[in-house]
Amino acid sequence: MIATLTGRVQQKSADSVIIEVGGIGVEVVAPYSSIESISGEQTFLYTRLVVREDSLTLYGFATTAERELFDAVLKISGIGPKLAVGMLSVLTVDNIRNAVRNDKPEIISRVPGIGKKTAQKILLELQDKLPAALDSLPAPLEDDSATEVMDALTALGYSVVEAQAAVQSLPADAPPSIEERLLLALRNIGA
């Protein structure tokens, strides 16, 4: 099994990165957040090799928490690696953990390809099966304003990924008002 990968970045796209390791270019499918975290020529990723009848696909993650959550989601019947990576592209590990702990399927259903019933199934399956490393992380504060700002941005036509990135780039001392946070997020998208 290939657990980690270190090498020179040859090419980045929206959903994968090609890393040169020992003169060989290895394509690694990764969540949007992991690809965006890659800077410079050298990179390090935690990986998981998924073997199917017709393919060998290497998935990469910036953190072990992302990889462990990917593994947990893959154990759910009907959820494949593409959808699991899609979840981690749209939602952070903390978003998913909060959705599971607080039984909020509407958070999971923001992911393209996941409807309300599938979101409820994911929450039910992950209820007692969150990886131990995720439970040991400190719980972030619930931020309903972030949810409202994301909903407003997606209603304005921005993709869930763009909205998530804009909300995550809000400073910690951002004003509490939803309107002011929305304006700041719109500036971040335009920047």
Image (cartoon, rainbow, N blue to C red):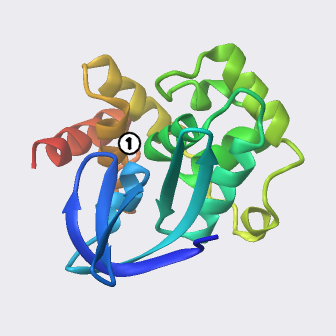
Q: List x then y, in percent, for residue 139.
A: 69, 61
- x%, y% of residue 12? 23, 58
- Residue furthest to the right: 128
Tag count: 1
Q: Residue at x 78, y 44 (%)?
A: 101
Q: Is residue 21 above or below residue 149?
A: below
Residue 175 appearing in the image = yes
Spot the residue most to the left.
Answer: 191
Q: Is residue 101 left or right of residue 62?
A: right
Q: Is residue 109 above or below residue 191?
A: above
Q: Is residue 66 visible?
A: no
| Rendered residue at 49%/35% (across/down) | 147
Quarter occupied by the N terminus: bottom right
Q: Nearer the viewer, residue 101 or 54?
A: 54
Q: Secondary structure at mark 1?
A: helix
Residue type of the residue flagged with mark 1: Gln
From this view, report whether residue 5 is shown above or below residue 124.
Answer: below
| Looking at the image, residue 112 lies above or below residue 190 | above
Question: Measured from the top left, where is residue 180 in percent x and y?
Answer: 27, 40
Task: Give the image quarter of residue 137.
Answer: bottom right
Name the residue beneath numbered marker 1. Answer: 164
Residue lying at the far front in this picture: please name it: 54
Location of residue 41 by image quarter: bottom left
129 lies left or right of 70: right
Q: Nearer the viewer, residue 84 or 10?
A: 10
